[in-house]
Image: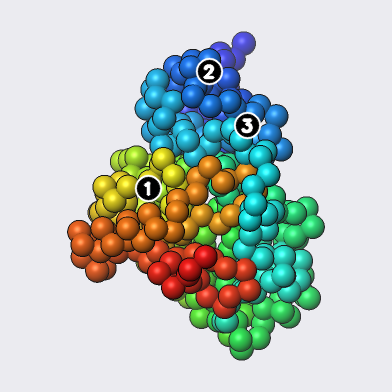
Amino acid sequence: MIPRSAAIPKTPSWQRQMARSFTRLSTLLEWLDIDRQKLPFECDDSSSFPLRVTLDFASRMRNGDAGDPLLQQVLPLQQESAVVDGYSQDPVGDMNAAVSQGVFQKYNGRALLITTAACAIHCRYCFRRHFPYQQQHLEQQLCDQTLEKLNVPDISEIILSGGDPLTLNDQRLAQLLLQLKQLPYLKRLRIHTRMPVILPSRVTPELVEMLRTFPLPVTIVLHINHPNELDKRVATVLHQLRHSGTHILNQAVLLKGINDSSGVLKELCEKSFDMGVLPYYVHQLDKVHGSAHFQVSRERTLELEEQLRKTLPGYLLPRFVTEIAGENSKVPINLFNH
Ligand code: SF4
């Protein structure tokens, strides 16, 4: 008989690790040694946007600490079901920007592709948590009609988004990149992903090679909200990505109780820069239904921006912005007055 241990590869593939993510609140809390009865808030086990977090990310949470800033990002709270004025299912106007199935164009020169509905983590504040992925994501192969929409002089940059595009396997990704590199007007490729942070093993040698050999400049925009998300394994894969010639930026979302302090934001900017990541944006929360408890006031946001400006060199200072549906760019928070 084959011993149980022999049936399991020593280094499970990233897909296997992703499949082993925490999806039950009780299991996660037990693993973190947190007594549910002592949580200061009620959780919701039956949310339509269920709990999901990788073991990797959970291992960076502090044991026994219900207030941990990484745990707060994934806990489904009962208060998410409260209806709050001003919060909606599509706060950034995605649906008005659809040009064909899975293709969106909000800003000049750029098109965004919804490559998948899948993510390795479910961030409670996600502005696409109610997104109708079933109707609005790309088919396996870009069809002729989609390629026609993308093959215009007006589109010089494609943004792979989702979901998380790096949850696609290497074969799917390679097919997609093959199709994209045949677009004559394309000058740049951008990938919006949390995978190198949430599941570092996703950064396989094959993926690094695929990015290295893509004939156009590639930029990865990560999404890291707190310095505790960064550890040695993340640093290692970021180093590999950088050595493939990829530019790496970070956009964070300002979240009450998680990173709404100048000390935390400063540490995030400095620590990510040490790992080769340039701070790009701090977004004010998009007012998506279910996320109101994360909102930081505009006044506090301006204060934080000012405090960071005084303590960081200019090249480490992210732009504090908000997204307003229908606007043709992100709006600096100091110009937005609502
Ligand atoms: S990884 Fe990105 S797309 Fe996925 S839930 Fe988090 S914020 Fe949303």
For the residue pair 302 and 56, the one nearer the viewer reads as 302
Q: Is residue 168 visible?
A: no
Task: Please give the residue where the numbered disc 3 appears in the rendered image.
Answer: 78
Q: Residues within 10 Å of mark 3 (few under 14, many from 20)?
A: some
Residue 260: numbered disc: 1
Q: How far across and how far down the image is residue 57, in percent?
A: 45, 36
Q: State the SS at label 2.
A: helix
The span from disc 1 to disc 3 (Cα, nearest Å) is 22 Å
Q: Is residue 49 above or below residue 317?
A: above
Q: Residue farthest to the top? A: 1
Left or right relative to 212: residue 21 = right
Residue receiving disc 2:
36
> Alpha carbon of mark 2 to alpha carbon of mark 3: how far?
14 Å
Asked whether residue 46 is in view, the answer is: yes
Tell me the kind of residue under disc 2: Arg
Cα separation, mark 2 vs mark 1, equals: 25 Å
